Image (cartoon, rainbow, N blue to C red):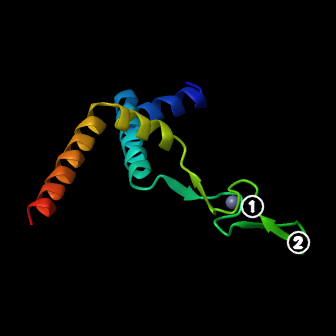
Amino acid sequence: MTIITAAAQAHVSAGPGLLGWVAIAIAALVVRVLVVLVSTTGRCRKCRGRKITTSRDGTRARTCPRCKGAGRRPRVGSALIHRMIWDGEIGDKILAGQRDRNRQRREDRAGR
Ligand SMILES: [Zn+2]
């Protein structure tokens, strides 16, 4: 038995296995989706949220070109995830609920 096959066998027996990895991947994906839903933007990685970039010697500062001075960048997949939700059935239900609530509020105000 070579070292490589021994290591491979050790890895298979010690590791979570294929199904385990799939479960981990799904869990990571779910966490990612939740994070994107809660916070659609992340700190700009180029300027680290400082909104300006400095030249290499640190003498000149200018507006961060990547976030254009916003200091924040949309998270990867946020547009896709939000489009999926707001264009899908879930979004329709949420929007319908909001419309109902708004109508209720208007009627309350008109009745008073
Ligand atoms: Zn930036």
Q: Residue at x 68, y 56 (%)?
A: 67
Q: Amino acid at mark 1?
A: Cys
Q: Amino acid at mark 2?
A: Arg
Rendered-image quadrant of the N terminus? top right
- From the Cβ of disc 1, is ligand 1 less than 8 Å away? yes
Q: Residue at x 8, y 61 (%)?
A: 111
Q: Which secondary structure, mark 2?
A: loop
Rendered-image quadrant of the C terminus? bottom left
- From the Cβ of disc 2, is ligand 1 less than 8 Å away? no
The residue at the far left in this view is 111
The image quarter containing residue 28 is top left
Rendering coords of residue 81 (x, y %): 43, 38
- Relative to 79, say whether 38 is above or below: below
Q: Mark 1 — residue?
A: 64
Disc number at residue 95? none
Q: Residue at x 54, y 57 (%)?
A: 42
Mark 2 nearby-residue class (10 Å; few <14, some 14–19, many ≥20):
few
Could you tell whether 95 is left or right of 50 in the image?
left
Mark 1 nearby-residue class (10 Å; few <14, some 14–19, many ≥20):
many
- Relative to 65, say whether 57 is above or below: below
What is the count of numbered marks?
2
Q: Residue at x 90, y 75 (%)?
A: 59
Disc number at residue 60? 2
Could you tell whether 41 is left or right of 47 in the image?
left
The image quadrant where one finds ligand 1 is bottom right
Q: CA distance from mark 1 to mark 2?
A: 12 Å
| Residue placed most toward the observer, 69 or 103 | 103
